[in-house]
Amino acid sequence: MVRDSQRDDSTIGFLIGTRHNKAAVQLALDASANPLAVTNYSTLSPADRELVPTEEDLSRIVQAAIDHIGERAPDH
């Protein structure tokens, strides 16, 4: 996906992993020039949890993106 600065608001990022990997987190943070706040979902307050997507929401969105890419991929 490409952000269209004329149409899209500033973005936030999520680093999603199945397990804690300090090296992967550090690499991702080093590659970003934007200020970041890093936390664990389980440590968010209930009010903050309502502001971010649930694990189920993220899974559904990621799967839809994967499916969309698969539909656009040329047959080999």
Image (cartoon, grey):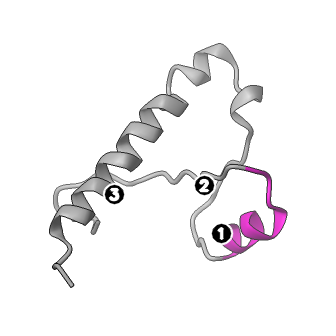
| Three-letter code, disc 1 | Ala
> On the image, which quarter does residue 65 sit in?
bottom left
| Three-letter code, disc 3 | Ile
In reply to whether residue 25 is colored magenta, the answer given is yes
Quick check: 16 above or below 31?
Answer: above
Element assignment for label 3: helix
Q: What residue is pinned by disc 1? A: 28
Q: What residue is pinned by disc 2? A: 15
- Residue 46, percent across and down? 64, 14
Q: Quadrant of the C terminus?
A: bottom left
Callout 1 crowding tier (Cα within 10 Å): few <14, some 14–19, many ≥20 = few
Q: Which mark is residue 18?
A: none
> On the image, which quarter does residue 61 sit in?
top left
- Residue 4, percent across and down? 21, 65
Would residue 5 be seen by someone viewing this image from the given angle?
A: no
Residue drawn 17% across the image and 56% down it: 7
Query: Who comes first in sequence, dot 3 or dot 1?
Result: 1
Element assignment for label 1: helix
Q: What residue is pinned by disc 3? A: 66
* Disc 2 from disc 3: Cα separation: 17 Å
Element assignment for label 2: loop
Query: Who comes first in sequence, dot 1 or dot 2?
Result: 2
Please report the bounds of the magenta region as a residue range.
Answer: 19-30
**Marks 1 & 2, CB-CB < 8 Å contact:** yes
Question: Is residue 2 shown left or right of residue 23?
Answer: left
Q: Nearer the viewer, mark 2 or mark 3?
A: 3
Most extreme residue toward the right, as rendered?
A: 22
> On the image, which quarter does residue 67 sit in?
bottom left
Question: Is residue 13 shown left or right of residue 62?
Answer: right
Most extreme residue toward the top, as rendered?
A: 46
